[in-house]
């Protein structure tokens, strides 16, 4: 035990030891001071136990850091000594002792100053004359009353977070206080305050929930919320805060900054429960000097802690919530209008794109018709040329070479004595062409005009153009199964037809022309089953 009665006053040997050490006295000098000033009182049994009034002896330990203490002269035990051991065990296990010692010193100083006018008795919890399983920091006794207030200052609220041991410890502590008819007041070190101003939300550990309290003002908040938060406003509040609660249960918790001697009271409602903590929504908060917080209210049934009547804050909370709901509805309406505008714009763009696709389809269809018509005209022209060529070839005497026969109109008498070929039967040219043969010829023609040819990059323009020119040359020079082609004439014909080349040397142009002529011979053989004897003249 660290305290004993001396001359009807409480003498705290530990407190005195710390005062002397703060004066830069060594351990030996502190012990000598106690021996010189108090040892004789100890020998005369002037020190008596606060609990049982038995004489106690002053024990001055040698080792640095160890406390000085009192012990019964007969080495017996009482509730004071047992409570002291229990208290020290709990403090060493669950608290930050250095911070707690400073805090309790400040608490005691303020309590004695604020409660002195009321004749209140303030004592340390372990001085209680009955053995307790949980020892409060302070016990306050009012004159002419059986009521006992207990005060605790918690510095390490996160102890046993994983196992939940500290939460269970606090739960049992509060239950014991209730069984002893104690009225508890709990204060948590300010370092454990966790709150976000922008969301108005904070977090409490499960252990912290056991040191919250519910006052008359909290009950008034419950009634106010139940009466005013209904229907759409309640739905908005639940969605806006993310609350998952069935009823309002307003509570409060006190945080203390002992170094600045300030007390902050948070009044809140829990909105969601998690494994090791809860999320709360702040209804109001007050920061007051610790001396005001620890003053007694007018009815002398509670500490003041903060502003007692919060009607103005409740009305302000409701007004702010309604304004937030109205702003939310405005934003939602604006969002719906914007979404509708976007949908209308998307529909307009969709319709415009559909019209554009329709125009493109119509244009493509028109182009196809034009290409088909041009192709049919080309086919008719080629077919007419082929028939004309065959007609002239049929008139050519057998003995005359095709190249010489082209000059027949200039030298008609030269061929007067030659035997002419018989004209083919009229049915071969005048009868309507078989659709299957026509389709096959069209297939051959498309293949001739589209198949890639080696070296064709030497020739400018569309590949169909120069191939059509060569096909005309073939029609003019093919006689039956014989085809004689002069490359130089073909090149001249191509140039006169507007075909240009990207090579200065015509020798390079002959290469793709030869390739095409060979491709023509092979295609006719494979597709039309006609063998052509091809002669290429340089």
Image: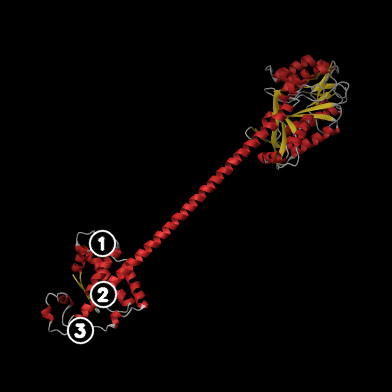
Left or right of 211? Residue 434 is left
Q: Is residue 2 above or below residue 399?
A: above
**Location of residue 282 in the rendering, given as x and y in whole percent from the top left corner:** 69, 33
Give SS at disc 2: helix
Find the distance from the CA under tag 1 to the CA under tag 2.
Answer: 26 Å
Residue 213's disc number? none
Mark 3 or mark 1, earlier in chain: 3
Q: Foreground mark, 1 or 2?
A: 2
Depth order, front residue of 135/495: 495
**Mark 1 or mark 2, which has the lower sequence index?**
2
Query: Which residue shows up at 18% across the image and 80% down it?
Result: 396
Residue under label 1: 459
Which quarter shows the N terminus? Answer: top right
Q: Nearer the viewer, residue 147 or 221?
A: 221
Instruction: Give the residue number, with chain letter if any, for mark 3.
Output: 421
Q: Secondary structure at mark 1?
A: loop
- Image check: 39 left or right of 439? right
> At 54% from the left edge and 45% from the top edge, which residue is drawn?
341
Does the rendering let one see residue 161? no
Closer to the camera in the image, 365 or 293: 365
Determine which residue is flagged by label 2. 386
Examine the image and state in which quarter residue 28 appears.
top right
Query: Left or right of 515: which side holds 25?
Result: right
3 or 2: tag closer to the N-terminus: 2
């Amino acid at each position: 035990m660290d305290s004993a009665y001396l001359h009807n006053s409480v003498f705290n040997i530990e407190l005195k030891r710390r005062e002397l050490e703060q004066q830069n006295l060594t351990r030996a000098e502190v012990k000598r001071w106690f021996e010189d000033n108090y040892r004789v009182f100890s020998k005369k049994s002037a020190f008596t136990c606060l609990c049982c009034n038995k004489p106690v002896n002053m024990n001055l330990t040698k080792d640095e850091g160890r406390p000085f203490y009192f012990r019964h002269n007969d080495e017996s035990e009482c509730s004071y000594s047992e409570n002291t051991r229990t208290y020290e065990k709990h403090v060493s296990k669950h608290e930050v002792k250095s911070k707690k010692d400073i805090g309790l010193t400040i608490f005691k100083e303020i309590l004695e100053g604020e409660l002195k006018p009321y004749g209140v008795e303030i004592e340390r919890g372990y001085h209680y004359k009955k053995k307790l399983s949980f020892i409060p920091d302070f016990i306050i006794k009012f004159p002419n009353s059986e009521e006992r207030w207990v005060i605790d200052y918690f510095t390490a609220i996160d102890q046993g977070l994983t196992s939940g041991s500290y939460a269970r410890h606090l739960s049992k502590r509060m239950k014991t206080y209730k069984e002893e008819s104690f009225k508890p007041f709990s204060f948590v070190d300010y370092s454990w305050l966790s709150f976000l101003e922008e969301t108005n939300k904070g977090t409490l550990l499960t252990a912290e929930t056991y040191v919250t309290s519910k006052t008359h003002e909290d009950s008034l908040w419950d009634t106010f919320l139940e009466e005013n938060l209904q229907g759409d406003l309640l739905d908005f509040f639940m969605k806006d805060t993310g609350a998952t609660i069935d009823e309002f249960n307003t509570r409060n918790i006190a945080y203390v900054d002992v170094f600045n001697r300030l007390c902050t009271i948070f009044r809140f409602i829990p909105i969601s429960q998690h494994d090791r903590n809860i999320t709360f929504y702040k209804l109001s908060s007050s920061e007051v000097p610790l001396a005001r917080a620890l003053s007694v209210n007018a009815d002398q049934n509670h500490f003041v802690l903060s502003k007692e009547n919060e009607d103005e804050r409740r009305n302000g909370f409701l007004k702010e919530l309604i304004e937030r709901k109205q702003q939310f509805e405005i934003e939602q309406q604006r969002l719906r209008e914007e979404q509708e505008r976007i949908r209308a714009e998307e529909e307009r763009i969709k319709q415009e794109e559909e019209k554009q696709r329709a125009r493109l389809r119509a244009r493509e269809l028109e182009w196809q018709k034009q290409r088909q018509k041009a192709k049919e005209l080309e086919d008719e022209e080629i077919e007419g040329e082929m028939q004309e060529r065959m007609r002239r070839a049929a008139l050519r005497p057998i003995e005359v070479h095709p190249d010489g026969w082209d000059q027949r109109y200039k030298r008609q008498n030269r061929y007067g004595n030659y035997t002419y070929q018989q004209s083919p039967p009229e049915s071969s040219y005048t009868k309507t062409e078989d659709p299957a043969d026509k389709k096959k010829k069209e297939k051959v023609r498309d293949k001739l005009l589209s198949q890639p040819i080696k070296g064709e990059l030497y020739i400018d323009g569309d590949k169909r153009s120069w191939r059509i020119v060569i096909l005309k040359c073939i029609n003019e020079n093919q006689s039956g199964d014989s085809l004689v082609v002069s490359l130089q004439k073909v090149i001249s014909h191509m140039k006169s037809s507007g075909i240009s080349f990207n090579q200065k040397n015509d020798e390079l142009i002959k290469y793709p022309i030869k390739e095409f002529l060979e491709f023509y011979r092979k295609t006719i053989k494979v597709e039309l089953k006609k063998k052509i004897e091809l002669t290429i003249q340089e």
